[in-house]
Image: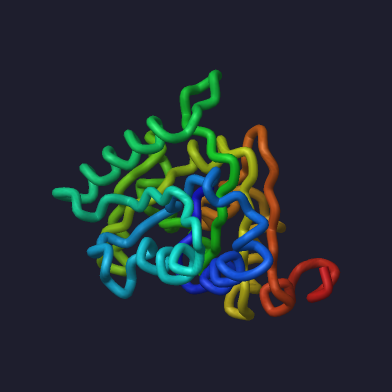
């Protein structure tokens, strides 16, 4: 499973670390990866790996195997190559194309339509490798991200979206079809399932209203 970073999934991870999930899930059979990471040290407040450790792993008696993105690498490109090698080693690939096939990918979405660290207008949208380094000019920072070929090879992709500030973007992502200006709309598993879990505020502009 690849985990999302940021604030939205933090509550989910805390729920999973408590009863009944902490005891009912066979954590010793789970392997956790990251969907993206900020180019910061592992102990930095903005680190997704740190958030996962604090919100999820610290609360489990039997922690699953966790494979954070290596931000201790010499540079982001080297880190992306190392994580690609990790995925190839740890995750079975689809016999058809050799791309590691994750069982589950959890994603969020920004108010600009980005998901993981796939931002509008960035070259990572065209990446063919499963993991890529990407510089985001708007944030003036480097990120590491799983790419569309790997995301779309997953068996199950689950989006978790909350907040009124996402409502307009969510309506476009779900209503306008795939668009490069809205990277979340490009996530469409070729041979897997796609789910959207949204709160009432985020769903306010969807057909059927906030009760959908």
Q: Residue at image x 19%, y 49%?
A: 73
Question: In this rendering, does residue 171 appear at all?
Answer: no
Task: Where is residue 45? Give x, y as percent.
Answer: 31, 75
Task: Where is residue 162? Give x, y as percent.
Answer: 62, 73
Classify residue 134 as left or right of residue 72.
Answer: right
Q: In the image, is residue 7 above or below residue 70?
A: below
Q: Residue at image x 47%, y 56%?
A: 63
Task: Where is residue 136? Give x, y as percent.
Answer: 32, 60
Q: Residue at image x 72%, y 72%?
A: 203
- Outermost left residue: 74
Q: In the image, is residue 121 above or below residue 125?
A: below
Classify residue 85 as left or right of residue 188.
Answer: left
Q: In the image, is residue 7 above or below residue 103?
A: below
Q: In the image, is residue 169 above or below residue 132?
A: below
Q: Quadrant of residue 54?
A: bottom left
Q: Residue at image x 37%, y 42%?
A: 131
Looking at the rendered structure, the number of numbered marks drawn on it comes to: 0
Question: In this rendering, does residue 57 appear at all?
Answer: yes
Q: Nearer the viewer, residue 14 or 152?
A: 14
Classify residue 100 as left or right of residue 176.
Answer: left
Task: Where is residue 150? Give x, y as percent.
Answer: 49, 38
Name the quadrant of the C terminus.
Answer: bottom right
């Amino acid at each position: 499973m690849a985990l999302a970073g940021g604030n939205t999934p933090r509550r989910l991870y805390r729920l999973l670390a408590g009863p009944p999930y902490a005891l009912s899930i066979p954590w010793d059979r789970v392997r956790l990866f990251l969907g993206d990471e900020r180019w910061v040290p592992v102990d930095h407040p903005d680190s997704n790996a740190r958030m996962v450790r604090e919100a999820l792993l610290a609360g489990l008696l039997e922690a699953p195997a966790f494979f954070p993105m290596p931000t201790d690498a010499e540079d982001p490109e080297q880190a992306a190559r190392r994580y690609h090698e990790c995925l190839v080693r740890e995750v079975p690939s689809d016999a058809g194309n050799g791309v590691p096939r994750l069982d589950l990918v959890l994603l969020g979405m920004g108010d600009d339509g980005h998901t993981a660290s796939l931002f509008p207008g960035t070259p990572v949208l065209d990446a063919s490798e499963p993991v890529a380094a990407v510089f985001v000019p708007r944030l003036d920072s480097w990120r590491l991200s799983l790419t569309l070929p790997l995301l779309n090879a997953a068996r199950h992709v689950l989006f978790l979206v909350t907040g009124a500030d996402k409502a307009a973007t969510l309506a476009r992502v779900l209503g306008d079809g795939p668009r490069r200006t809205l990277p979340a709309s490009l996530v469409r598993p070729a041979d897997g399932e796609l789910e959207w879990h949204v709160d009432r505020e985020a769903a306010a502009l969807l057909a059927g209203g906030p009760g959908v």
